[in-house]
Image (cartoon, coloured by chain):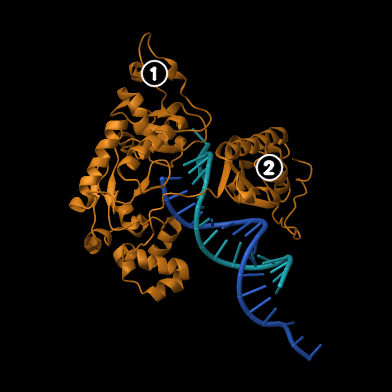
Chain colours: A orange, B cyan, C blue
Amino acid sequence: MDAFFASVELLRYPQLQGLPLVIGGGRRRADEALRHVPEGGTLADIPVAAFPRLKDYVGRGVITTATYPARVFGVGSAMGLMKAARLCPQAILLPVDFDEIRRCSRHFKEVIREIAPVLEDRGIDEVYIDFTEVPGGQREGGRVLARLIQKTIFAATGLTCSIGVAPNKLIAKMASEFNKPNGISIVYASDLQTRIWPLPCRKVNGIGPKAGAKLQAHGIHTLGELAACERAWLIQTFGASTGAWMHEVAWGRDERPVLTHSEPVSMSRETTFERDLHAVHDRAVLGAIFTQLCAQVAADLQRKGYVGRTIGIKLRYDDFRIATRDQSIAQYTADAATIRRAAGQCLKRVPLAQPLRLLGVRVGSLVKADSPQALEPARAHAGSRTGHTDVLSGSLF
DNA sequence: TCTGGGGTCCTAGGACCC
DNA sequence: TCTGGGGTCCTAGGACCC
């Protein structure tokens, strides 16, 4: 989906079309002005001047989506809002409306499934579709079906998307970015050398900042240069698994099927505090947040019908270092108090002398709540705990 | 006054079991 | 006066993605 979060807001506020618009932010949402709907009017009648501006934002949020008129100023996804405010203070800032986003996400996926049922969910705004068995799916290399999907989604939701059609998921993902927004791109296996090899290695889904930098350091910038590397050298340099995989993707090879179903592995809740908190000085407020996170995860599990038995915590310190601890318990659970107790044990095993920026709670090893395993006691690991125990932590939580 | 939240997968060492 | 080998589970950290 094209600039999904921003596009969803533009449906409600068409008066913002063409203006720099940024979606993002944390708890402190400067959206009070949006109550200024004129007498007898709608959301579309709110004057542009009433909308909150980036320069008025106070907090630690990041940008989720920026529209093109905002990107011109150099602001983009994942940028801190404070930095973005210096680049484009007059940009309009709207918070993420998760309920509305989820509704639109379900809607566009349903529209696609009615046309092409073999669909893999890749998050809120992205899917893989297998055209192979869809009637007409091969016409013009898939362009006819892609156009039909685009038009049907737009008619149903008013939203645009970009589609890449290719022999496999690896190439299709790259192709989908060739012609944004509202574009279609068809890439054949025979186009590998002309259309894929000139691309930077970072365009591959799975080659991130670290692998990209390491490739660069070896003078490998494009996929063509990667394809020219000896498989044995790649394995020697990046390890057996990653090295072999890099060789495959550089040659455009990918056999992964489109998966229509998957089970969740873990569920978590985490929060970044408005200011850094200290385990001793801010003990009460930290404890309340901790309890609330456990309650939220428990509610998520119960709502979705899952139980888990690996309970974990995550801390982010003021210097951005991350620490995690987890513990597997004997009984599967979705109970807030049980989660809280196990997570509290985890907290006693992690250093707490340094100010904290973030706290998270996670439940893993999930099974369906109504499955036979959910009732059976599993083996809880009772091995020796040689981990670090901070002198401060014992009585805190 | 930089840097969210919710995920998946991989690696690697140690415990433990047969 | 020597100490195997294979398999699974548990835990911590890290890379990466949307």
Q: Which residue is mark 2?
A: A339
The residue nearer to you, when weighing A195 against A335, is: A335
Q: Is residue A362 left or right of residue A239?
A: right
- Indicate the quadrant where residue A253 lies: bottom left
- Determine whether A54 is above or below B10 in the image: above
Position of residue A341 measured from the top left corner of the image (x, y, whole percent)? 73, 42
Callout 2: few (<14), some (14-19), or many (20+) C-alpha neighbours within 10 Å?
many
Q: Secondary structure at mark 2?
A: helix
- Indicate the quadrant where residue B13 lies: bottom right
Q: Is residue A391 left or right of residue A141?
A: right
Q: Amino acid at mark 1?
A: Ala
Q: Secondary structure at mark 1?
A: helix
The residue nearer to you, when weighing A62 against A359, is: A359
The residue nearer to you, when weighing A383 against A32, is: A383
Q: Which residue is mark 1?
A: A50
Q: Chain of mark 1?
A: A
Q: Amino acid at mark 2?
A: Ile
Q: Quadrant of the N terminus of chain A?
A: top left
Position of residue A279 measured from the top left corner of the image (x, y, whole percent)? 70, 40
- Name the residue at 40% across, 74% down: A233
Q: How far is disc 1 from disc 2 in space, using C-alphas?
A: 44 Å
Closer to the N terminus: mark 1 or mark 2? 1
Q: Quadrant of the C terminus of chain A?
A: top right
The label nearer to you, 1 versus 2, is 2
